[in-house]
Image (cartoon, grey):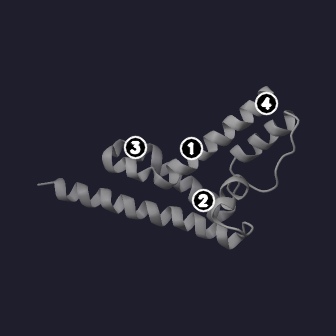
């Protein structure tokens, strides 16, 4: 039972990380210091998605599930939990690239707004 609780905790942490990566730039609009934490997450996720790297949270969650007596799911976190919510097909390499580039584009747009605000506020 403790392993399954830990596995659920890792899955929740993973979800928070993904949401923060995609939308955390909005926090930077209000609190610029958040960029110090947010920008590295964007770089990490873009690298993971575009270069096919694995996130260490997924194997950790799977290991905890197996230790708790469950069967580990196939594939990665996004393919297992998030993709079925928005996309009916399997996670292909092209879709991984699209996800990574989407994160990059969203955050470039947000940081563009942050930069324009900082330029406008200077006398």
Q: Mark 4, residues whose alpha carbon is within 10 Å: few (<14), some, or many (≥20)? A: some
Give percent across and percent down for residue 121. 17, 54
Mark nearest the camera among 4 and 3 is 4
Which residue in the protein does label 4 denote?
Answer: 3
Q: CA distance from mark 2 to mark 1?
A: 18 Å
Which residue in the protein does label 3 denote?
Answer: 34
Q: CA distance from mark 1 to mark 4?
A: 20 Å
Q: Quadrant of residue 65?
A: top right
Which residue in the protein does label 1 denote?
Answer: 16
The circle drawn on residue 59 is: none
Mark 1 or 4 closer to N-term? 4
Q: CA distance from mark 4 to mark 3?
A: 32 Å
Name the residue furthest bottom. Answer: 94
Determine contact: label 4, label 3, CB under 8 Å. no
Determine contact: label 2, label 1, CB under 8 Å. no
Q: Quadrant of the C terminus?
A: bottom left
- Looking at the image, is 90 positioned above or below residue 35? below
Is 112 in front, or is 40? 112
Q: Mark 2, residues whose alpha carbon is within 10 Å: few (<14), some, or many (≥20)? A: some
Is 92 in front, or is 84? 84
Q: Residue at x 61, y 46 (%)?
A: 15
Which residue in the protein does label 2 denote?
Answer: 47
- Looking at the image, is 94 positioned above or below residue 81? below
Name the residue furthest top. Answer: 2
- Left or right side of 89 for 44: left
- Left or right side of 117 for 40: right
Q: Mark 3, residues whose alpha carbon is within 10 Å: few (<14), some, or many (≥20)? A: some
């Amino acid at each position: 039972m403790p392993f399954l609780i830990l596995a659920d905790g890792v899955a929740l942490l993973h979800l928070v990380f993904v949401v923060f990566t995609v939308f955390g730039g909005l926090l930077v609009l209000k609190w610029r210091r958040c960029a110090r934490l947010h920008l590295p997450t964007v770089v990490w996720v873009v690298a993971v998605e575009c270069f096919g790297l694995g996130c260490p949270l997924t194997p950790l969650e799977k290991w905890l599930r197996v230790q708790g007596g469950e069967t580990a799911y196939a594939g990665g976190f996004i393919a297992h939990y998030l993709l079925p919510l928005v996309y009916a097909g399997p996670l292909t390499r092209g879709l991984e690239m699209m996800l990574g580039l989407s994160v990059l584009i969203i955050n470039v747009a947000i940081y563009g707004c942050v930069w324009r605000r900082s330029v406008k506020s200077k006398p």
